[in-house]
Image (cartoon, rainbow, N blue to C red):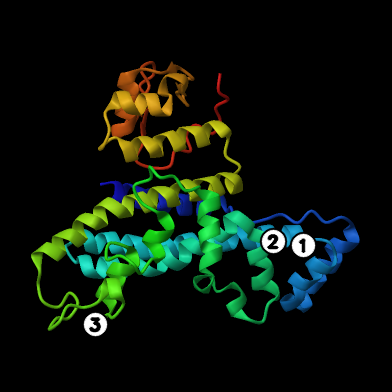
Amino acid sequence: MAAFLYAGRVDGYIQRADQEQLTKETINFKTAADASAYAKICEEQGDIKEEWLIQHGYKETLYKVYYKHLFFSLLVDFSNYYNTSIDLAYHGNINVAWALLRKPFQETLAYIEWLYVDRNELLTLMLTSDDTGSYEIVRKKDKIRKHIERICPPNPSDPLDMYKFRYSYKDQLTLNGILQATNHLITSRPALKTSPSGLNFIFPDDEIRHRNIGFYYASIPYVLKYTLDLVMKMFGEIAELSDYTMLINLTNSTLKSLQMISEYADVKQLLHLDQINVFCPKCGHRHNSDEMWIQFAYDHFECENCHNKINTYQFLFDFNEITEK
């Protein structure tokens, strides 16, 4: 269930970006002469307009445009592969479902992480370097590890090591461990070596199949929760969402991830729910009851005053006009 929930939320960001045209950026020209010169460049020599912007002091504006365009393009790529993967997993094709996660989890997500940690470094390399190897992230494992640790500092209590799960070859129960078997009939790495007289995943083995299915639904939601929280921060900045909207959505995301594995009383204490008020976007009525939070975590919020109802299985833009009281 959590895997499908997170997929819907990523799609919600993409739809909102299209609706609000968030990739557009207005150029505030310093002078009328600059505006006229840029218009002429675009009309006559459009292929050098980026160079003109950099040379005339508009590098920051140009980078904002590329940042937003690259971010949402990566998000679409991630969503396409991930959505197809969970669809195949749902229909029982677990090996191909795993195989489709290589690109979104090992490459696309790594570029999103790079954009978050140091967007100017990545954009500068992409715009100025003739060597694609200078920004080929899969060859920069140390950089990937540093980015992950910057975003989510290591915690011994975490159920999954984000870097090891996505890139380690030393265990069968990692993304790479399973990918090697789904993409190659014979593997030779010590921890992933094909058994004698065997071919990886060719001969039916219910134990391995059930293991791979169980591990898919146990591990993938954890990675998606990490991805969703990261993307939420980046999207919130681009869309200029209010702090209250971000708080409500982060709380909702965490509620959804904990509701099936924790008792409500524990979740309430962990998230300090008694300190978070939910205001109805329609009438402004304040809510903070256990009953409201349990329903919020399950599938919806309903105002007890005006009965305005909001589906909570999506990113919630409804609260963006509210100033917390």
Residue in view at x 28 percent, y 81 percent: 188
Mark 2 and mark 1: span between their CA atoms?
6 Å
Tell me where residue 289 sits by quadrant. top left
Judging by the rendered image, the residue that carries numbered circle 1 is: 59
Considering the image in quadrants, where does the C terminus appear? Answer: top right
Callout 2–callout 1 Cβ contact below 8 Å: yes
56 to the left or right of 179: right
Residue in view at x 27 percent, y 73 percent: 192
223 to the left or right of 59: left
Amino acid type at image mark 3: Ile
Residue in view at x 43 percent, y 59 percent: 163
- The front one of 39 and 279 is 279
Q: Secondary structure at mark 2?
A: helix
Q: Secondary structure at mark 3?
A: loop
Mark 1 and mark 3: span between their CA atoms?
50 Å
Judging by the rendered image, the residue that carries numbered circle 3 is: 186
Which circle's residue, 1 or 3, is located before the other in the chain?
1
Judging by the rendered image, the residue that carries numbered circle 2 is: 63
Q: Residue furthest front?
A: 190
